[in-house]
Amino acid sequence: MLNLTIKVYIRSQDSKMTLRVRFLVETVSETPSEDGSPVFGPDREVLAEGDEGELLSQVAYRAGITIQQTCGGSPSCTDCRVTIKEGFENAFEEMEHAEQTLMGNVYFITKERLACQAKLKNSCTVRVPNPKRYRKQQKKKK
């Protein structure tokens, strides 16, 4: 009689969790106000899923959400600033020095992060400003 020992090796799946991100996207009316400035409406809710450690900007892109960005994720512009409505304390990995420098010392009060730098750690709710608001603010600065 022949004795066989069978060893079974199970390769574990990547341990990253799938997380839910609720985006509140600022909407703008097609018809501007009398002075020509855009009229902003209620936020549009978009639910998306992302992996633990994934950048918030990547999750938004896959969900079809436009987040203003000119630096390409370097970080150097702060255009992709979003407000964390739920989960600010534990939804993302800690800020790295470059992001902290750009955001200043009040990021924990304003609950803002750069979408190109914020890596998911837990589920959250994020408010995304409309790109038209950003363009309007840039015109005022000039």
Image (cartoon, rainbow, N blue to C red):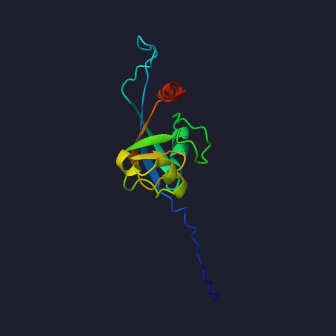
How many numbered marks does the figure carry? 0
Tell me where residue 85 appears, x and y as whole percent: 36, 43
Residue 43: x %, y % from top left = 38, 30
**Residue that appears at 55% across and 26% down:** 142
Quadrant position of the N terminus in the picture: bottom right
Residue at the limit of the structure toward the bottom, as seen here: 1
From what the image shows, is residue 116 above or below residue 135? below
Asked if residue 119 shows in the view, the reply is no
Residue 8 is at least partly visible in this image:
yes
- Given residues 95 and 20, the one toward you in this image is 95
Q: Going 59% across and 73% down the picture, which residue do you hit? A: 9
Relative depth, front residue between 52 and 57: 57
- 8 in relation to 123, above or below: below
Decide: is 104 above or below 38: below
Residue at image coords 43%, 13%: 35
Residue 128 screen position, x and y as percent: 45, 36
Furthest residue toward right: 2
Residue closest to the far top: 34
Q: Choose between 36 and 30: the one closer to the eye.
A: 36
Q: Is 91 placed left or right of 52 in the picture?
A: left
Give the percent coordinates (x, y) of residue 73.
Answer: 60, 46
Which quadrant of the structure image shows residue 37? Answer: top left
Q: Is residue 27 left or right of residue 59?
A: left
Is 39 above or below relative to 83?
Answer: above
